[in-house]
Each structure stands twice: as structure tokens, then as C-alpha cells.
Image: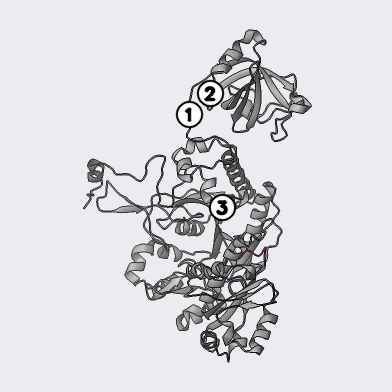
């Protein structure tokens, strides 16, 4: 007899609906769950009973046990929770269900009890349903009963436990930080919470525990982690939610290599417990190598279609757009080759300009090399024979290829072609097998914010500059590098981190360069600045996006599929109706009123 599992102890059932196998034949069992399907074959009634672990087929025979269970089975309907008792028996070879883990057995039922009834659900509780996401979110508690959704929650639970265990075994200390804290904007808008007992003052929900984990390092914790809930009031998308979970990590008395090596051990351990091999040491790709080769600081390297620099070829071109870019400092002419897309119809190719515009392009220059050897393009008439020959060689052109160009500032050109690379890989159904892990390192310290006409931190304002670039900060801030590292998985930023400034004077200089007055810096970050004066150690850390990693592990394309109760793209909870109005009395309690 199989050993009793913990889930079957202190429960109404003695077995779950997913654990019975041929070796359990002859065993008396009690099962609980929901009626998934009921099939009345006249003389027999068959029922698929479902719980979180799986499905077991029940058989109700009017000749068995005076037919009491059979009479109850005649009344049962989908999604009724029931409890049954019976004997496990083997199915005949011709009736085995190879699609179910329990498909070799069934339970001949001698007793059944209806625990509750259910109205007709708004959709089938099964995998592969063609139901709108809004409906699924409105009835999320029913959606979670579906096996694929339950499997997602199980995977998330297992991975969270695995990474906790990996960190704990390496002597990281789990420390909980407050959810009500000071508003210290870190790039996105804060969710703010009015204080009732201090009228006119507000808490903020944390965008991350960034400043608090630095203070923990000042406090001597040395190795910290937390599975932290974070909040950011920003526009949403498939892999972003207003509230999300990150595995937050910080270490002190370390250099960058110490932190990255420790993280590799932790991540490899956690992924290994999930059956996913992450070879170490991970590749480390410089930021500009990633941008110039893949057009992204989170590159998916499982397929080619690399960006190719053609600037030198078009230095003397009669095509003015290319010639201008080729002779302008900081600008480039680059291209990608989407093999196979050159056979597309002209109308389909023309639509790619609209796609490119979403990545910042004003248009899209292209050349289609048709499979019959002909060339179709609105720009090729401007190219000399020498330019065409050089282009063909450098882009490895073959019949059926579509070459797409970007010309202009280096970073913008990279981003345009990087976006098109990803779009074309999906459109051409290029296979991306297995998982792809790497570090992208040495990000710029700053970027220029065109809207604010000011410098902005590429990662966050507390990032340590690259030691050799400290002298560049005043003279040429955009040339300065940083001690940063992003963990990239399958073309997504799965986590990121960096070394921290642990000198109060340097931190103030950084904030001033970002546009802070000394008064504003003291107002928002004074507690940190003061702490740094009390012997702050060298420190660095990392935050892993738990939701995003679980999304990638499940193979889903939406982060909502691995969250129990997510929001829609508009930030709404369709199930509860949040956000919603509150009463005037509640507003009065916190000294607020609606205009």
C-alpha cells in the first residue's frame, strides 16, 4: 500500500484525485472534489471527479451497495462538491485513458454525499477554453479550478520555496520591511496612502525595498533576502502589474563579482529544483554589445537575425538618408535580415512600417530579395553596384530574404531594429527552444530624459559608477558606466541589480546631477544620507521578478496567468470591482474630499 501523503491527513479524503495508480487496485478510498463531467450510460453512470491534484473516474452501478450511491449520482451536476467512498479497480485495456495520470484505474463507488450544489458556471472548467480573459478574471475563483491554472499556482509555490531554500542554505537572513513608508519616487509614480492620525501627511506603498535593504546593510545584516510585494502606479502590459512580487536580495562587504557569483549559485540551485538546468558561470554580455548585436538590453540569443553595421558601406551613397547618418557622429546605418520574409506580398511588407513606428522609427527602408532572383524595393534605385554587392555579402543575402534598415542615432537605430527582430521572429514562427540565461552588465550610469530635459538614472539614483569612469561624471555624464548587472531569461529582464554608493558625499553629488537641490535630496533621502555617514560598508544587491520568471517557466505569454488575482490592463479587478468609490465619511476620516 502506498504511503499516506500529508495532504491526505487531517482531511475528509484519504486520497486525492490525482494520486491513484494501478498499484492502488483493491484499496478502499474516500475522495472529495468537484464533479467535472458526468456521463449517464443507462445502466452505469460515470463521473470525473476533480481536485487540485488531478482527476479520477468514478463508476456508479445500480447493482452495487443497493444502488444508494447511484441514486445520488443521478442528481449530481457539474461543479457540485461531493464526497465519495469506494474501491479502486483496474480499467480494462480498451477503456484505459492514456491522457490521465489516473487513467488505468477507476473507483467503484458505494457511498456518495453531496456537500453543496452549484449554479451553472459561466464557462467550462477545463483546459484550453476559448473564453475571454475578462470573463475568466470576473470569475477568477472558477478559473483557478482549471488544471492548467492550478498547475501554474503550484509551480509558483514550488519555485518560491526553492529560491527561499537556496538563499536560506547560504545564510541569507529573511527580513520583512514595511509596506507603509515614505514617498521616495524611484522612476514610477507611488501609490500614496493618507494618514488619519496625521492629517495632510501620506505614506507610500513601496516600489521596492531598495533604500530599506541598504539600511539593513548599514545595520550589519550582511546577507538579506525577502519575497517582497512591490507597488508601482504605471501603465500596464502583459508582463507588468501595479502590484508584483520580487525576490529582493542584498549583500555587504562584497564586490560585484562576489554578488554575481553568489546569485548564480542561488539561481542555478532554485532552477535545478524545478528541473531546469542553468549552466554556470553565466555569459556576461556588455550593454553595448547587447544593444549593437541584438537591439535590446534583454536579448533573446536563441535565434540569430543579428543587427549588422553597414555605416562604412554607405558613407558616399546617393541615398541621402543613409549618407547623412553615415557621416554624422554618433549615427549609424544598420540592418537585419529576416530570412523567408522576402517572399511576402508587397502589401504585407508595407505594413511593417507601422510596426517599426511603435519602436520609434519614422519609416522603414527595406529590400525584398525575391525567390525568383528579382529585387523589390523603393530605395534600391539609389544604390550603386558596389554598394549592393557589399550589402549582399555582409548581410549574407539569399533568395527569399528581407533586409530592413535603420539609419540615425546609434541607440535609436538599435532599438528600432531590436523591436523588428523580435516582431519578425514571432511572425516567421522562429523556434525558441529551451531557456536562455545570461547577464547583461555595465549599463550606462545615466540617460538623457528628453521630456524633462535632464539626466536620469539608467537603473536608480543609488547605483555605484564604474570606478574608472568616476572622473567622467562631471565632464560627460552619458559616457559614464555603472556597476550593474541584469539577469536575462528568454529575452526578458528577469531580474536586475547593482553595486550601491556607500559614501554620503558621492550620493549627494549623484542626486544633484540628477536635478535634486540639496533641500529636496535631504527631504526625500535624508535618512539614507545620514545612515551612509555611519560607516556604511560596500554593498550590492539584486531583485528577481518572481511573477515574470514563473510566467517564463510555465511557457505563458501573460504574467496574469501566474498570479492568483491579477488586475486588467486598466488596473481593474473585475471580480471585486476595485478600484471603487469610498464613502464621504471615509474621506473625512483622512481629511480628504473630492473636488
Magenta highlight range: 294-303
Q: Which mark is residue 59?
A: none
Does 254 appear above or below 134?
below
Which of discs 3 and 1 lies nearer the camera? The answer is: 1
Q: Quadrant of residue 587?
A: top left
The outermost residue toward the bottom is: 316
Per the model, the C-alpha gap separating discs 3 and 1 is 30 Å
On screen, residue 434 versus residue 580, left or right, reads: right
Q: Let me know if residue 300 is in the magenta part.
A: yes
Residue holding disc 2: 77
Instruction: Determine the secondary structure under disc 1.
Output: loop
Give the x, y percent position of residue 21.
Answer: 73, 28
Per the model, the C-alpha gap separating discs 2 and 3 is 34 Å
Instruction: Determine the secondary structure under disc 2.
Output: loop
Give the x, y percent position of residue 584.
Answer: 22, 43
Looking at the image, tell me whether mark 2 or mark 3 is earlier in sequence order: 2
Residue holding disc 3: 557
Residue located at (60% from left, 52% from top): 552
Q: Which mark is residue 120?
A: 1
- Asked whether disc 2 touches disc 1, contact meaning CB atoms under 8 Å apart, the reply is yes
Amino acid at each position: 500500500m502506498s504511503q499516506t501523503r500529508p495532504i491526505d491527513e487531517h482531511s475528509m479524503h484519504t486520497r486525492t484525485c490525482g494520486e491513484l495508480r494501478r498499484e492502488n487496485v483493491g484499496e478502499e478510498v474516500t475522495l472529495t472534489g468537484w464533479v467535472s463531467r458526468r456521463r449517464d450510460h443507462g445502466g452505469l453512470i460515470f463521473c470525473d471527479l476533480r481536485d487540485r491534484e488531478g482527476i479520477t473516474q468514478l463508476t456508479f452501478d445500480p447493482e452495487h451497495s443497493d444502488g444508494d450511491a447511484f441514486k445520488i449520482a443521478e442528481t449530481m451536476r457539474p461543479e457540485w462538491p461531493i464526497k465519495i467512498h469506494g474501491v479502486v479497480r483496474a480499467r480494462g485495456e480498451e477503456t484505459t485513458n492514456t491522457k490521465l495520470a489516473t487513467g488505468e484505474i477507476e473507483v467503484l463507488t458505494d457511498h456518495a454525499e453531496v456537500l453543496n450544489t452549484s449554479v451553472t458556471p459561466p464557462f467550462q472548467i477545463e483546459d484550453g477554453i476559448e473564453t475571454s480573459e475578462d470573463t475568466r478574471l470576473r470569475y477568477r475563483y472558477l478559473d483557478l479550478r482549471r488544471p492548467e491554472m492550478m498547475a501554474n499556482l503550484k509551480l509558483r509555490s514550488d519555485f518560491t520555496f526553492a529560491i527561499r531554500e537556496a538563499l536560506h542554505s547560504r545564510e541569507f537572513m529573511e527580513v520583512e520591511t514595511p509596506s507603509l513608508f515614505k514617498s521616495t519616487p524611484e522612476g514610477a509614480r507611488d501609490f500614496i496612502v493618507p494618514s488619519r492620525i496625521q492629517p495632510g501627511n501620506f505614506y507610500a506603498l513601496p516600489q521596492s525595498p531598495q533604500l530599506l535593504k541598504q539600511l539593513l546593510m548599514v545595520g550589519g545584516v550582511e546577507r538579506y533576502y525577502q519575497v517582497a510585494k512591490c507597488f508601482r502606479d504605471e501603465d500596464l502590459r502583459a508582463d507588468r502589474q501595479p502590484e508584483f512580487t520580487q525576490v529582493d536580495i542584498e549583500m555587504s562587504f562584497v564586490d560585484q563579482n562576489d554578488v554575481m557569483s553568489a546569485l548564480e549559485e542561488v539561481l542555478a540551485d532554485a532552477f535545478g529544483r524545478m528541473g531546469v538546468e542553468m549552466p554556470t558561470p553565466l555569459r556576461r554580455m556588455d550593454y553595448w554589445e547587447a544593444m549593437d548585436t541584438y537591439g535590446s538590453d534583454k536579448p533573446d540569443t536563441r535565434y540569430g537575425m543579428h543587427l549588422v553595421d553597414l555605416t562604412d558601406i554607405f558613407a558616399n551613397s546617393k541615398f541621402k538618408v543613409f549618407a547623412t547618418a553615415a557621416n554624422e557622429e554618433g549615427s549609424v546605418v544598420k540592418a537585419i535580415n529576416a530570412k523567408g520574409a522576402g517572399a511576402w506580398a508587397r502589401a504585407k511588407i508595407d505594413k511593417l512600417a507601422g510596426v517599426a513606428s511603435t519602436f520609434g522609427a519614422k519609416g522603414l527602408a527595406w529590400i525584398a530579395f525575391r525567390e525568383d532572383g528579382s529585387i523589390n524595393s523603393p530605395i534600391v534605385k539609389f544604390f550603386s553596384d558596389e554598394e549592393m554587392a557589399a550589402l549582399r555579402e555582409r548581410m549574407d543575402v539569399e533568395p527569399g530574404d528581407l533586409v530592413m534598415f535603420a539609419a540615425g542615432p546609434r541607440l535609436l537605430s538599435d532599438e528600432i531594429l531590436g523591436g523588428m527582430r523580435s516582431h519578425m521572429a514571432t511572425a516567421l514562427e522562429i523556434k525558441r527552444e529551451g531557456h536562455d540565461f545570461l547577464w547583461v552588465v555595465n549599463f550606462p550610469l545615466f540617460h538623457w530624459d528628453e521630456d524633462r530635459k535632464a539626466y536620469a538614472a539608467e537603473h536608480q539614483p543609488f547605483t555605484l559608477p564604474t570606478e574608472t569612469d568616476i572622473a567622467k561624471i562631471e565632464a560627460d555624464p552619458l559616457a559614464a558606466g555603472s556597476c550593474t548587472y541584469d539577469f536575462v531569461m528568454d529575452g526578458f529582464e528577469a531580474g536586475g541589480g547593482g553595486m550601491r554608493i556607500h559614501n554620503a558625499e558621492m550620493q549627494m553629488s549623484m542626486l544633484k546631477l540628477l536635478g535634486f537641490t540639496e533641500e529636496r535630496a535631504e527631504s526625500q533621502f535624508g535618512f539614507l544620507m545620514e545612515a551612509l555617514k555611519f560607516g556604511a560598508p560596500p554593498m550590492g544587491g539584486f531583485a528577481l521578478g518572481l511573477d515574470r520568471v514563473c510566467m517564463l517557466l510555465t511557457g505563458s505569454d501573460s504574467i496574469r496567468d501566474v498570479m492568483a488575482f491579477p488586475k486588467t490592463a486598466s488596473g481593474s479587478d473585475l471580480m471585486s470591482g476595485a478600484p471603487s468609490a469610498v464613502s464621504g465619511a471615509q474621506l473625512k476620516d483622512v481629511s480628504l474630499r473630492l473636488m
